[in-house]
Amino acid sequence: MEVSVIVPVYNGEKYLPRCMESLLAQKFKDREIILVDDGSSDGSGFLCDEYSALEGVSVIHQENMGLGLARNSGMKKASGKYILFLDPDDYFGDSLINELYDAAEGERADLVIGGFTTVYPDGRTKAFPLTQKLMEFSEAAVNELVLNIVGSLPEERQDSKYGVSACARLYRRDIITKYGLGFVSERELISEDLIFNLDFLYYAKKAVVIGTASYFYCTNAGSLSKKPRSDRFQKDCELYEAVEKRLNRFCKESEYKLYLYRFIISRARFDMIQGVVYHDRAKQGYPLRDTVEDMVNNKKLQLALQEYPWWRLPVMQGIFAYMMKKRNMSILILLIRLKQQFRPGNQNI
């Protein structure tokens, strides 16, 4: 078995058929599909059982443990040389596995990173292909990859050049088993994908970045309008500390500081957007101003903003960062509302 595709499923009956159609239509056939029903309360578990009757498809049913731990359950069952993750509300282009696998085998790589295409609720799509690159892991090369997963330099449009997701990536399974790697619970750290990638890269010897954008990441209508968890930014700060601890294994603070600062600035920006959208669309009693004020007064965020060259950012991101630095809550909220008026559902500035 060459590739194990792990699909964690929680209350995903609306999207699972599309996801599975894309998997079953793959040109690459030496694969297994492992569905992990993570305590779903809708019809997802029944759908998983139906799909498990197909050749090469199996299912695990477990109590709800969260996305990361559901993936861990799938990895324990996996038998493939490589592991690939797919979220149930997303889908693959029909040659994605081929593209990732051919790159891994051709370069004998431990990790292959692909780009993705965002699918918006109104049907619009936007591709985010990557520049093809082979990385033999000298100290300089691994640092470049790790830093550009955590963040990016100020001039880059995207907050992370390579993205933090574990999807659209092919991982060599024997590294995972040899070093006992796995996902932390999202209830412990808010971005289990980023932590898994940093832990995996600590042991990897070679990575390939390919130009494909055949992973389709779907943004669902209303996702931004969900109630933000009250401790969201506090959790982001805990993640910041966990990321910094791992970065210290790779390089000096002077090398990673700009990337880490952009990471925390972008997390604050996203949390503020989520808060404004929830207040305006779902619950006007939500304490929006107090929430934004707590964020801009956060010591970690202000330290980053005081040292960060905000003027080098793309124009709107630079203005937003400057207003966070000046703690101008009214302008921050206004900027988000203006953006949402012209691009509803957009998660960026």
Image: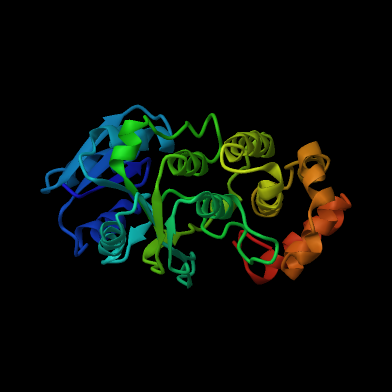
Q: Nearer the viewer, residue 247 or 280?
A: 247
Left or right, 55 with reference to 327? left
Q: Nearer the viewer, residue 339 or 130?
A: 130
Image coords of residue 310 (percent x, y): 79, 60
In the picture shown, does residue 8 fall above or below 156? above
Q: Quadrant of the C terminus?
A: bottom right
Residue name at image x 66 percent, y 60 percent: 153
Is residue 38 at all visible to an observer of this figure? no
Image coords of residue 347 (percent x, y): 61, 59
Say how many tags the image has.
0
Residue name at image x 84 percent, y 59 percent: 331
Q: Residue furthest top?
A: 63
Residue name at image x 87 percent, y 49 percent: 327
Is residue 257 at all visible to an observer of this figure? yes
Q: Quadrant of residue 228?
A: top right
Left or right, 121 with reference to 151? left
Q: Quadrant of residue 112?
A: bottom left
Image coords of residue 335 (percent x, y): 77, 63
Residue name at image x 55 percent, y 55 percent: 144
In the picture shown, does residue 321 fall above or below 68? below
What color scheme is it? rainbow
Left or right, 163 with reference to 309? left
